[in-house]
Image (cartoon, helix red, strand yellow):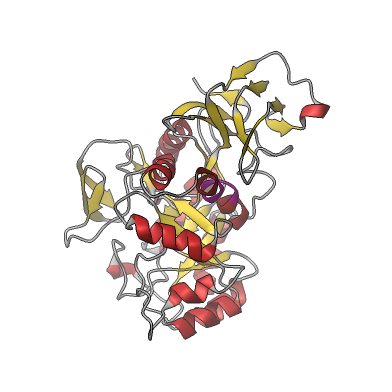
Amino acid sequence: MRIVGGKAFDGEGFAERDIVIENGVFAACEDASGGDEVVDASGCYVIPGLVDLHFHGSAGADISDGDLAGLHKMGAYEASRGVTAMCPATMTLPEDVLARAAQAAAAYEPAEDEADLVGINMEGPFISPSKVGAQNPDYVRNPGVDEFRRLQQAADGLFKLVDIAPEEPGADEFIKEMAGEVRISLAHTCTDYDTAARAFELGARQLTHLFNAMDPMHHRKPGPIPAAAERDDVTAEIIADGVHIHPAMVRLAFNMFGDDRMILISDTLRAAGLEDGTYDLGGQDVTVRGPVATIENGALAGSVSDLMRCLYVAVRDMGIPLASAVKAASANPARALGLEGRYGSLDAGCVADAVLLDQETLEVKQVVLRGKPLA
């Protein structure tokens, strides 16, 4: 198959070129015939399928339900929105609940119209009881290597990210022991600059939903954000849904970290793709009105804007260059998950996931999933 007539993303910008697909992967144009099927991308940008490494659910389902049928609902919804590789995030819950979620994820095999499940993000329970946000405080506990390894076994190795508050007892030992086995991200934390800097020195490599559930920057108490920005090997997630963070702060983040180290995430709940109402999140009620989701105390409880919508908002409403936003929603999360060269790129050899965006509106015109156009 060939995708012709569009402006294709090359990792840094856009250029007119044909995209060739053979056997479900992208091929080098000069080495491939491309077959008989042609997708006309005239008037469109051609970008890689997006990779969401931090969202909880969509289409009425949540990974923490431990329900395989729910994962298939999520996979179909995400793929329809151009999110072709998903790494859903579990919540702060008892170990047996997390184990069921891990087992369900390990059993997931995508249908033809469903996104690949490329990992699990363990957002809780190793967080600060003082920065729980929408997590359940009843199940917060200190980082535990043994517990994580039990869950990793249940998941058949699918946990790619684990979040911790580095100031909590056992955090240093956890980072030292696990940094070579899983990507560690600082999250839901009261950490100061020095403690965060030590965590990065020990091997932590990410900052979860930048600005949210962490202390803000202050000129005498800088906190974790400058500690992360100073290191070239640390990435930062950000929710660009237009609700969680002011556009000026999103622009500041891209300027501080550079677009090679920013990762757009959606942090969506099961309500993504559904109407306003009340929904469950980790055993707590969440009220959704328009783009805003809150728990009973009024705290924000994740998002209802999928990653493609966040990319749109980042570009149209926040002034982030399209190339930077695409990189932050595809190549960068793929690299953070250890999937560089397989997802998040139109380069030869990568899984043939592509999205055609209207050049004028940035709306999704067509999704190509594993080399086949979605209906």
Residue ID at (54%, 54%): 155
Residue 230 lies in the magenta stretch: no
Relative image position of residue 361 (x, y in whole percent): 41, 30
Q: Quadrant of residue 1?
A: top right
Of residues 325 and 157, the one nearer the viewer is 325
Of residues 83 and 320, the one nearer the viewer is 320
Q: Quadrant of residue 247?
A: bottom left
Relative image position of residue 98 (x, y in whole percent): 43, 58
Q: Residue furthest right?
A: 31
Visible in this render: residue 14?
Answer: yes
Magenta residues (range):
327-331
Q: 286 above or below 42?
A: below
Of residues 268 and 135, the one nearer the viewer is 268
Of residues 89 and 229, the one nearer the viewer is 229
Main SS category, magenta section: helix
Residue ID at (59%, 79%): 201
Residue ID at (45%, 49%): 320
